Amino acid sequence: MIRRVSAFLILFFGLMTLVSAQDIKPTGYFLKDSVKIGELVPYSLSYKDKKNRPVIFPDSLYDFSPFELLDKSYFDTHSDSINSIDSAVYYLATFEIDTVQSLSLPVFVFTGNDSIPIFSEKDSIILNQVVTQMPDSVSLSETRAFQPVSRQFNYPYWIIALVLLGIIALVVGVIWGKEIAKRIKLYRLMKKLEKFKVEFDMEIENISSDTEKTKIESLLKFWKSYMESLEQIPYTKLTTKEINQIQNNSSLEETLKSIDRNIYSTLAVTTLQNDFEFLKDYSVDRYNHVTEVIKNA
């Protein structure tokens, strides 16, 4: 019997607490009398309750229909010895076209293991309609003038294209890489030979008995430089004897010795054109040998 009375008393006082909490409604109202569509309008919400009782105000997750929440400001709690006052300002906007729009917001009061929503009285605001009457027809002006539009760079397509080109280049390199490298090398050797023959012929035509020995030496060095790039042998640093040891060609040896005599002896220049013609022919022969080695590699 005592347990039943105790349970009844607990339930009674709980209900009395709930009723007393619900009697104290929050105060909510718009800070403007009217608003335009999309215009910011502040809404003030405050609640006075017993001191130290937890109270929660609506946040961005709450549905503010027919308004939309744009921003909010919460203020510090003000308390005296008995009561506390909490307040906030919500900055709202409406995109509805109703002439009068109303809003009532709650505060959530904790009563133990649960919370009770207590709503403020509804406050209304008038919508200022900019267009009060729609015309039957609209007069539109036509223009055919060209309006330039800036072109945007299509990065996704370019990235896809570059990836595809990279894949194609990789496949080509794996399958035909060696053959392509051969053809490129042979083409470069051919162009070097053509350039060498043209320039070498021009120099040979100008050789005579009056040609300066320094000019002859320069022409011989020019031949050695070409042979060095062709066979990857340091001709420019080798003597006639060392070149013959590498090439083992008696005709080449005799020709180089003849040119050396014309450079270093005090005798007049003789038979140099024939000597340099031989060097040119020898270069062509070595070019053919090198290219055959590359082709058969």
Image (tube, rainbow, N blue to C red):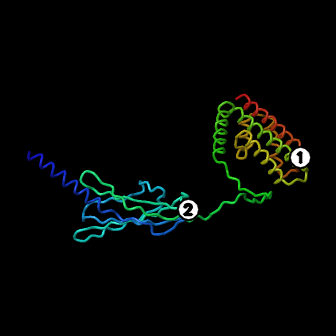
Say whether residue 11 is visible: yes
Indicate left or right for 217 with 62 as reference.
Answer: right
Q: Is residue 256 visible?
A: no
Question: Residue drawn at (30%, 66%), measured in percent from left and top?
Answer: 48
Q: In x, y percent, where is residue 151? A: 70, 53
Amino acid on which disc 2 is placed: Ile
Depth check: give the residue in front, 136 or 21.
136
In front of the other: label 2 or label 1? 2
Q: Residue at x 85, y 54 (%)?
A: 212
In this picture, residue 156 sits left or right of residue 42: right
Q: In this view of the protein, which residue sits in the foreground, 229 or 266?
A: 229
Q: Quadrant of residue 232?
A: top right
170 to 69, vertically: above or below = above
Which quadrant of the figure has residue 76? bottom left
Specify the amino acid type for callout 1: Thr
The N terminus lies in quadrant: top left
Q: Which residue is mark 2?
A: 37
Dividing the picture into quadrants, the one containing residue 162 is top right
